[in-house]
Amino acid sequence: MSEPQNEIGDQAAEWLLRQDDAQWSADDQTQLDAWLGQSHQHLAAYWRLKAGWTRAERLAALKPSQMRPESVTKPKTARPFFRFAVAACVVGITGAVFAYNWLSQERVVGTAVGQRAKLTLDDGTHIELNTNSAIVAKITPWRRTVELQRGEAFFDVRHDAARPFMVLAAGHRITDLGTKFSVRESKAGLKVTLIEGRARLETANPALQHHATDLVPGDVAIVTANAMSVEKMPTRAVTERLAWRTGKLVFDHATLAEAAAEFNRYNSTKIVIAPEAAGLQINGIFDAGSVGPFTRTAQFAFGLAIEKRGNEIIVYRKKS
């Protein structure tokens, strides 16, 4: 169940007030980071309030000096009280909330099995969605966040140092440092492939074991709930992994079981490879929807049999 927005706003204001205290410690910062990592709503509320305080303090600093007589000395308690008042205003004033929503962009985009989609955000970032994928993109004047809810997406990010671009997926966060990268979420774990630039990959969910690394071109990171590994791949291999962007599947010494699993992501007709044929290896480039040509290739290349059963194509070795 999602938290009420007013409660999240109150919590964010409390964190900011505590942060202004002279007793703020490293342990406090760790607790704040954990709270921010619990959801993108926490992150948005915190930065929205922080930005509101900053603007309010700037306006206060710009007031003419004659409106504030030099003979009057402010007590030291005035600043915390001022911050508290600003927090109350930012949380409670309907106009501020309306302005934030008006300046914000949220888009929900999804694809069905076999479909792909392209979109461009207002900041100039290009996103491509693979089969059976979904994202929620939230662009505000202070932050840019995309949540990958399922599937796979490619990001060509328009870098903006003042507004970090973050992708949230499977309890982890990828922060853009001027980047082109792909993110795939599956039962096997989260896979991040960096094509260009740099990106920071780190655990965002405090319930998971914490991992963090900086990725450079050619890096492929595989993350599960308890582990992270990074391998370097040649340019050709990275390009092959992104062939889905043109509707192609590229196999280089892939087993029939692995190839069938990829085809099954894109098609309602499923390929079932019998255990005795699962380890046979195949090479080639296929259209993502070419279930028939792929199974016939396997049939003739390895002397296998194929049989259609409902929405499944069974590939098996003939009995002698």
Image (cartoon, rainbow, N blue to C red):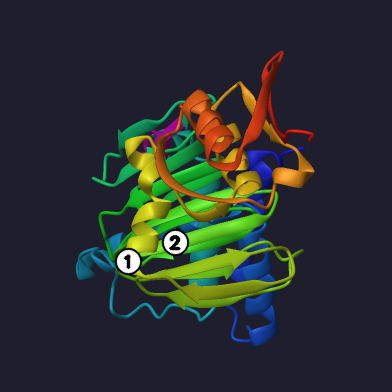
Residue drawn at (69%, 21%), measured in percent from left and top? 307
Tell me where residue 71 appears, x and y as whole percent: 32, 80
Q: Name the residue under label 2.
A: 193
Residue drawn at (62%, 70%), measured in percent from left and top? 33
Residue 80 in which image quadrant: bottom right
The image shows residue 124, relative to residue 227, as above or below, that is: above
Q: What element carries label 2?
A: strand
Is residue 183 among what the camera can see?
yes
**Front in this rendered view, residue 16 or 286:** 286
Residue drawn at (63%, 51%), measured in percent from left and top? 280
Tell me how far mark 2 sits from mark 1, CA to CA.
Answer: 11 Å
Tell me where residue 299 appears, x and y as whole percent: 58, 33
Left of 69 or right of it: where is 149?
right
- Please check the rendered image and state whether residue 106 is part of the magenta-colored stretch, yes or no: yes
Residue range corresponding to the magenta coloring: 99-108
Q: Residue 235 carries which label?
A: 1
